[in-house]
Structure formats: structure tokens, C-alpha cells
Amino acid sequence: MKLAILFSGQGAQFPGMGLDFIEKEPQLKERLTQFSLTTNLHLESLLADEVKIHNTKFTQPLMVAVEILILDLLREKYGLKADGYLGFSLGEFTALYAAGFYNDFDLLQIIKKRAELMAEMGTRTQGKMAAILSLTDEQVEVICKEVSTPNEVVVAANYNAPGQLVISGEANAVLRAVELAKERGARRAIPLNVSGAFHSPYMAYAGSVLKEYASHFKLNDHHSVVYANSNAKPLDKNNVLQEIEVQISSPVYFKQSIENMIADGYTHFLEVGPGQVLANLVKKISADAKVFNVSSYEDIQNIKEIL
């Protein structure tokens, strides 16, 4: 068995996520309080807030905090060990923590800054994202090129699974791409409820500012394998800051990352954190992969074979 741990990104959040772990394991409540002090956010109350939990400024630190708490519980109480890590967009930062590149407090400060920058860029540019289903990647890429103009750009943003690709860019260009995708046979082409054109060139400024901010935090020498969103290959310490910069404005090559991990011998995939979006995507990418997820405290009972 070769095990990879996956961390989902923004969009998987839901009110109350992680609170069942905190109720069952008192030490996690203490740690969440420390995270609140580090981020200057009252994370426990925000986790229960049905409105604020979907606000980018809060969603990102909340998601990463919950993923860290669940991961470390599985490690410390149940002896979970992994051979490599992969995170989807925001989840890549949890992967950087899990692999040992950053400590938890430093990472949460970086994430808080990322959330603020992305929220700011979302209000500064009129951006949208949309999911295109049942067309090939190449068909969607062609559509993006055809509808883009110098001032209104749309690009492929998230390579999720075969026949499932998310596009991102200027709002009008995204809507043009949605209509053209329908004309060319897309089973569904759906604008998403997001606050900006994430993973598009419109986020480049946020990436450059975040890289500068992250450069002030210590990167550790000893680390495990993380597959990078921007190229689907294992990440070297010397390239971490570059990855932090470009992954905000580059496509997320999730499908390609899973394919590369399988080629590298990974057989089991465990999604840690809210929901099971990534677990479901892995099943679509590979029918042979063994897939698990821990979103609720009760889910721990279902992963005994990999503990």
C-alpha cells in the first residue's frame, strides 16, 4: 500500500464543519483557541456562522484549521502515516503543513493573508467561474481561446476529472464560454457561486504579494512529498515560494496529479477535511484506486484498514 492524503479547497466548507471533532476531543478545542489567537479570528464561532463561513476571508483559514486538526488527530491518536500529499487549491497549503514545509501557526498566518488578498481581488475585478461537463479538456481550452479578448480573458482553471473542467476569468467572457460550450454539446455548463476569477491571470497580483509575505516565514528542510497544483509534479523546497505565487493564478492540475501519483505507485487515497469532493473525483479518475475520506468524527471508523 502506498497512501496519499488529500486536502480539499474552498467550496467544500459547510456550517459546523469540524465541530464534532472538537466536541469529542477536548485537546482540539484548546488548539483551535491557539489558532484563533494566531489569526486574530474567533474560529470556533465562525465555524458555526452560516453566512461568514462562506466569505472567502473566513473560509480559507477555517478550512485549513479544520484540516490540520483532523490530520493531527489521525496522526497522534491513530498512528496515520502517509507517503505523499496533495491539496486542491487552498488545500495545497494544508499539504505544505502536512509534509513539514511549514509549522501550523506560520501557515495559518500565510493563509489569512491569502484569503484577504483573494477577497480583495474578487471585489476589484468582475470575475466568474463556471463548471463545464462532458467535453474534453481540449474542447474547453479551444472555447476559452475563441471567446477571450485582450480585455476579457477566460482560461481553464481546474482540471478536476475526465469530462469535468472549471473555467475562470472576466465575467462576460465566462458567460460567452458557457453558451458556446452548450452549443458544442456540454451536458452542463454552470456558472459557480464564487467571489472572483480564481486560478486565472486576474489573480496574479495577489500571488506576487503573497509570495513576498510568505518569504518572511521559515521553510523547513525536512519534508515529505507534495505534488504541486501548478505542474502536477513533486514539489522541491526551493520552489515552494514560487508555487505559492503562481498557484493562485495558474490552473489546478488535480486530474494530472492523481494520474502521476498512480503512475508513481500510489494505491490508496484519503481525503481529510470537509466533504468528499476529492474522493469522488479520484473515483472518476481511476476505478482501481482505493478511496477513503474523513469529514466527520464517525468517518474514522471507516478507515481502519489504512491506519
Image (spheres, rainbow, N blue to C red):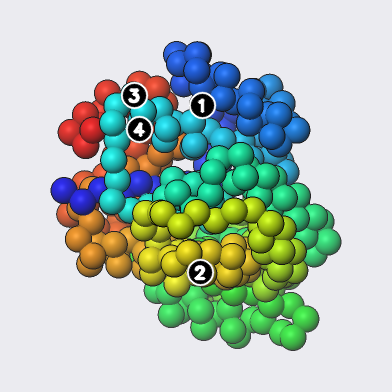
Label 4 is placed on what type of residue?
A: Arg
- Secondary structure category for the residue under label 3: helix
Q: Earlier in the sequence, mark 2 or mark 4?
A: 4
- Residue 203 in percent (x, y) is at 70, 66
Disc 1 designates what residue? 18
Which of the two marks, 1 or 2, is nearer to us in this view? 2
Q: CA distance from mark 1 to mark 2?
A: 33 Å
Disc 3 designates what residue? 77
Disc 2 designates what residue? 238
Q: Residues within 10 Å of mark 2 (few under 14, many from 20)?
A: few
Task: Say whether residue 290 is visible.
Answer: yes
Q: Is there CB contact under 8 Å for labels 3 and 4? A: yes
Q: CA distance from mark 3 to mark 1?
A: 17 Å
Residue farthest front in this picture: 221
Q: Earlier in the sequence, mark 1 or mark 2?
A: 1
- Residue 81 in percent (x, y) is at 29, 40
Label 2 is placed on what type of residue?
A: Asn
Disc 4 designates what residue? 75
Residue 203 lies, with reference to residue 89, above or below; the image says: below
- Residue 243 in percent (x, y) is at 55, 66
Residue 26 lies, with reference to residue 75, above or below; the image says: above
Q: CA distance from mark 3 to mark 2?
A: 32 Å
Residue in view at x 29 percent, y 27 percent: 78
Q: Is there CB contact under 8 Å for labels 3 and 1? A: no
Which of the 4 quarters of the picture holds residue 291?
top left
